[in-house]
Image: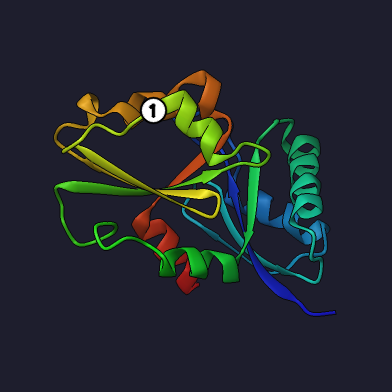
Amino acid sequence: MDTKRYVAFLRGINISGKNKVPMVELKKGFEKLDFVEIKTYLNSGNVIFSSDAADTIKITSRIEKMIKNQFGLDIPVFVISKEELEDILHHAPDWWGDESKEIYDNLIFIMPPTTFKDVYSEIGEPKEGLEKIKEYKGTVFWSFSRKDYQKTNWWYKTANANISTKLTIRTANTVRKIVGM
């Protein structure tokens, strides 16, 4: 069996004292699932690990169960192979993730079975001049003006209860750092 590198993004942990999950404990949980070469990045639920399992849906469900058992939390988890993540970054639009301090660049991961179409019909068009989006393989590159973020369409709506549980969002820098780990 081939061992493969994966990234798990946990949704909504360690935010303003809610859903506390210590990274050291989380790492131990991943070890109990027989994952290896486990690294965590930041406190916001980014875990890089290796496994010879190939089914990301099964991997996801095992991680969610472990979090429920170990921490008593129902946390949505998004698992992607490092290879896929590299491919996604390789397809980033020119306007995404540059050095501009005026612009905030995020990568939105759409959690299956939700699709881009579902997200788009819920959120609608980005506000012209203030934000841009580009869909690629279950993710959305999203950039917006730091100064005018309150005026953007996607800012409030990605946090809206109907859709927020179907997404997990990371900054361009976080995603790049993880791919480099």
Q: In which quarter of the image is the N terminus?
A: bottom right
Left or right: 39 in relation to 175: right
Q: In this view, does 93 lie above or below 127?
A: below
- In percent of width and height, residue 74 lies at 70, 31
Q: Nearer the viewer, residue 33 or 8?
A: 8
Q: Position of residue 117 (x, y in %)?
A: 53, 36
Q: Is 134 above or below relative to 152?
A: below
Tell me the kind of residue under disc 1: Gly
128 in relation to 100, above or below? above
Left or right: where 123 falls relative to 53: left
Q: Which residue occupies 50% across, 32% down?
A: 119
Q: Which residue is drawn at 57% across and 29% down?
A: 165
- Which residue matches tag 1? 124
Residue furthest bottom as drawn: 2
Q: Where is residue 87 in the image (x, y as percent from the top left)?
A: 50, 69
**Residue 18, x across and y down, in percent:** 53, 27
Q: Tell me the residue at 79%/59% (across/down).
A: 55
